[in-house]
Image (cartoon, coloured by chain):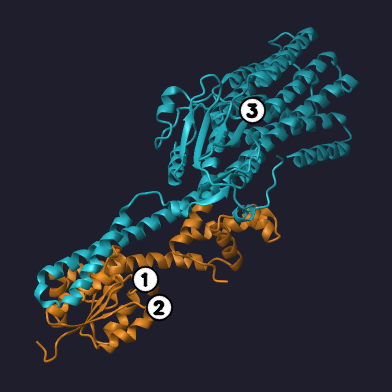
Chain colours: A orange, B cyan
Amino acid sequence: MSEHATRVALVEDHALLAESLNLALSAEGFATRTVTVPPDAESVAEMLDPVLDHRPDVVLLDLDLGAAGDGTALVRPLTSAGSAVVVVTGASELTRWGKCLANGARTVLPKSASLDVIVDTVRRAASGEVVMPEARRYELIQNWQRQRNDNQDMRAKLDRLTPREEEVLAALSEGKRVRDIASESFVSEATVRTQVKSVLAKLGVTSQIAAVAFARELDWRPSG
Amino acid sequence: MPAVAMLALGASVLSARGLGDMAQVYVSLHLCLCLVTLAACAGLYLRWRLTGEATIGLLAVAFAILALPQLLLSLTDVASGASDLARSTDPLIQLAVVLPAAWVLGRCVRTPPVDSSLRPLRLGVIGGVGAAVAVVAVTLATQQGWLPPTAPYLAGAVDLVVAGLAFWFAHLFRTRAQSVARPLTTRMSMVFVGLGLGALLSVLAREWWSPVWLLSELVSLSAMVLLGLLATSLLQTVLDFHSVRMLTLSLRASSAEETVRREQERMHELRATVAGIRSASGTLSRYEHQIDADRKQNIEQMMTEELARLERLLSTEVDLATLGPVMLDDVIRPLVVRHREQGMTVHWRPTGACALIRADEVAEIVNILLTNAYRHAPGSPITVTVDDLGQHVRLTVADTGPGVSAEVAERLFDRGMRSSLSPGQGLGLHIAQRLAANQAGTLALVDTPTERGALFALTLRAAGPVDRAATSAWTASGYDADE
């Protein structure tokens, strides 16, 4: 045990869970502080200073932080500041888990993990022990990287669109018909059809619906 | 298509002037006619690919059988630079072409709306090539002197038979072909009347360039051009219909995506709430003595609130709070206009009735019902009525088609339910009924034993008369129906 009580910061959107974890960890002898999400928070970056003020040895970090957004972005700065980050999340997407681990989180626990497991993990993380089996960690990070590469391929395809093709794809995504697009942009339907064909060819899909789904999957917006 | 026909005609006349031979005009003209007919076949075939209407598929086959041998004859004429009038009016040649085509046309008037075993492309190519081979065989046999020269009266008799068949088909199409859209039956019978007249006139005209002969050629030509125009417009209608369908599907897909996203959020909330309650209850039981009274009371209070929240999250009650008063006319009008544009006859009168609904979802239901009527009772007029029943508003969509058989009616709204004749996926009515339930409404098939056709009734919660301005915001476009 170090000379000072282990400091734990709780970044948790959900008040009851935060309060009960705070009580349990305090009862276990940790100097615990809950950092609440301000209701008017615009980005998770606003929460970094309140957390670091506590100089936590361990941060229990939730990922879905309401108005503030995605807590994933906090993992790297907290890790760089020397805290051991333990993610406790209700999110089931394993790629998000992988991203947190790749950014330096010590482990990821589901919110359904028992109190014992959480307290034990905090204790071991504070003393620098390995809290997640290496194989599992490697697998999750690989999984995330694979998806990121896939997304990069798709993104590269979208980047090849000309500004006009981007406009056409955006209009299709809004459910507009070729005829509507043509009349809005004062060109002939045949011209728009040619542009649509070129979009389909560049994205490597065969239908307008598939092109729209492609753009939507990446949450794509025209760059113009 | 008309532009192409004009261009081809112009080109043929120009080329003939260059050669200075009127026989060339005749030859080129016939070549153009064959090409127009084949283009019409292609148009009809494409329409069949998109709709699966058996009548359309068989029409394509019949005209392919008529056009392919003619094309062969025209091409040899072009190659030889002259035409042999006697040959192209040879009764044996005509019979070789007309009889198989007539057989297909006869089937086409009687066929059920959808025939999944139909392969028009294969049938058209086989029939057309077969007729062409027969034509070549007859021509060769005549040239070799194996067949006696045809008596003119025989040629006249065959022309009379052809004319009779054409008029008979014209009559059948007016009266019997109810399995396809109505514009088709009228205009198709005009095509046959044209062909019959052409054949009749050619009985009287046995020599080139006589006025009657010219008239007969002109009438046949007009019939073929009309066929071409008809095929184009049939194709255009179905393409428009498909683009509307595409739009509807993409709207439905995005609304489904939205539902999935909402459900995922709800699941996430549920998990987080349960995790909080479980963690709090664990903390309370394990550290009971280390927690001071204030915090204990606080956490117990929070647990009670969270349990209530859990209950709300799990309730499956229709969220009536999101229903708003909407003028039904505003929902129905754009749909009626759109379906009228597709060539459907829709009777509807605005009533000013208002219902507590989500406008986009009710629009989806009505669209499904109209599309359904169009698909199962093509050509039949559709009547949309809205009745104010006090507490409820009843919207009905009725057609005068074949109706719904008792065994299908039982499972009509089941997921994936479709009759063997239906080209659909069997999802539409299932979705429509679910959407109706979403706004505390019902959708049912009404039994109409005395009348023909299917009648669907959508019952919705009534809203008192509302301010027009408050509801008009939803009306997306400036559609104005001729009511």
For the N terminus of chain B, the image quarter is top right
The lab-note entry on whether marks 1 and 2 share a chain reads yes
Which chain does the numbered disc 2 sit on?
A
Q: Are marks 1 and 2 in contact (CB under 8 Å)?
A: yes
**Corner quadrant of residue A116:** bottom left
For the C terminus of chain B, the image quarter is top right
Camera-nearest residue between B75 and A207: A207
Earlier in the chain: of badge 1 and badge 2, it is 2
Measured from the top left, where is residue A155 in percent x and y? Answer: 46, 67
Mark 1 lies on residue: A66
Residue drawn at x 58%, y 56% as measured from the top left: A196
Q: CA distance from mark 3 to mark 1?
A: 66 Å
Extreme bottom residue here?
A3
Q: CA distance from mark 3 to mark 2?
A: 71 Å
Residue drawn at x 21%, y 71% as measured from the top left: B299
Label 3 is placed on what type of residue?
Ala
Mark 2 lies on residue: A41
What crowding class fits label 1: few (fewer than 14 Cα within 10 Å), some (14-19), or many (20 or more)?
some
Q: CA distance from mark 1 to mark 2?
A: 9 Å
The lab-note entry on whether marks 3 and 1 share a chain reads no
The circle on residue B64 is 3
**Corner quadrant of residue B84:** top right
Disc 3 on helix, strand or loop? Answer: helix
Which chain does the numbered disc 3 sit on?
B
Label 1 is placed on what type of residue?
Gly
Camera-nearest residue between B430 and B469: B469
Disc 2 on helix, strand or loop? Answer: loop
The lab-note entry on whether marks 3 and 2 share a chain reads no
* Depicted B405 relative to depicted B288: above or below: above
Label 2 is placed on what type of residue?
Ala
